[in-house]
């Protein structure tokens, strides 16, 4: 059987990666979204095992030590990482797996999976990104400041990716994402 593709979707916090993905995941059963582990506290409505595996720092560090993570990074004071086994087994089964991860992790994936297809989602502007993060109403002032700081660094690295999508008009961005994933 043909192996599935590994697809990396990166872009600053608040840019709408999750919403874009939700718009396409239901349509394409051959796509699988990897569920990350994180030490961040769940936001309202987030479910353990669905949105993330919410784990302690000790548990996360044990996962790193045991080589259980395909990549990991520290972001705005918390650890985030991709459990290796589910990704590798789904790719073996011919499924395409999407990792929705930040820049450090995306660079790490590139070292180990040079054939991964890497997509970067840009906001129309930094001001609009800040409005979106604040509009989410889920992050403290410190978390917002850290996320905006990190956003600037990530946006400067957008050119490292195979495709860049601007999430300005949502429907157009969904079409661009579909083209980026399937039109390769
Ligand atoms: P949030 O706290 O807003 O859910 O996520 C913060 C950032 O961490 C986002 O940019 C998200 O894409 C990224 N992220 C989520 N899971 C992972 C992961 O497994 N690895 C890495 N490197 N970043 C992740």
Image (cartoon, rainbow, N blue to C red):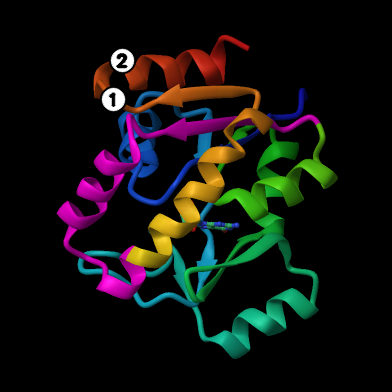
Residue 107 visible here = yes
Contact, CB < 8 Å: mark 1 with mark 2? yes
| Residue 1 position by quadrant | top right
In the displayed orientation, state which residue is furthest to the top.
183
Q: Position of residue 110 (x, y in %)?
A: 77, 41
Q: Nearer the viewer, residue 27 or 61?
A: 61
Residue drawn at point x = 26 percent, y = 18 percent: 171
Residue 168, disc:
1
Q: Position of residue 58 (x, y in %)?
A: 61, 90
| Residue 147 position by quadrant | bottom left
Q: Position of residue 69 (x, y in %)?
A: 71, 64
Q: Left or right? Give the position of 5 relative to 137.
A: right
**Mark 2 neighbour density, 10 Å: few (under 14) some (14–19) many (20 or more):** few
Q: Is residue 91 magenta?
A: no
Residue drawn at point x = 68 percent, y = 32 percent: 160
| Residue 26 position by quadrant | top left
Say which quadrant the C terminus sits in: top right
Q: Nearer the viewer, mark 1 or mark 2?
A: 1
Q: Left or right? Give the position of 81 relative to 63.
A: left
Compared to residue 151, the image places residue 38 above or below, namely below
Residue 172, disc:
2
Q: Is residue 117 magenta?
A: yes
In the displayed orientation, state which residue is furthest to the bottom.
58
Residue 39, disc:
none
First to last magenta residue range? 115-144
- Element on which disc 1 rests: loop
Compared to residue 13, the image places residue 125 above or below, namely above
Q: Is mark 1 within 8 Å of ligand 1?
A: no
Q: Position of residue 136 (x, y in %)?
A: 19, 55
- Element on which disc 2 rests: helix
Q: Left or right? Give the position of 117 relative to 79.
A: right
């Amino acid at each position: 059987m043909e192996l599935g593709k590994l697809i990396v979707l990166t872009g600053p916090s608040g840019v709408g990666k999750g919403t874009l993905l939700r718009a396409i995941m239901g349509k394409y059963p051959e796509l699988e979204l990897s569920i990350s582990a994180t030490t961040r506290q769940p936001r309202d409505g987030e479910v353990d095992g669905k949105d993330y595996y919410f784990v302690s720092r000790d548990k996360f560090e044990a996962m790193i030590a045991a080589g259980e993570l395909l990549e990991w990074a520290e972001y705005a004071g918390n650890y985030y990482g991709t459990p290796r086994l589910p990704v590798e087994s789904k790719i073996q089964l011919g499924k395409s797996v999407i990792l929705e991860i930040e820049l450090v992790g995306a660079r790490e994936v590139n070292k180990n999976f040079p054939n991964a297809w890497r997509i970067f989602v840009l906001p129309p502007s930094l001001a609009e990104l800040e409005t979106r993060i604040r509009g989410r109403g889920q992050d403290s002032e410190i978390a917002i400041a850290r996320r905006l700081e990190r956003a600037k660094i990530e946006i400067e690295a957008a050119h490292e990716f195979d495709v860049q999508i601007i999430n300005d008009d949502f429907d157009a961005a969904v079409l661009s994402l579909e083209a980026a994933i399937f039109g390769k």
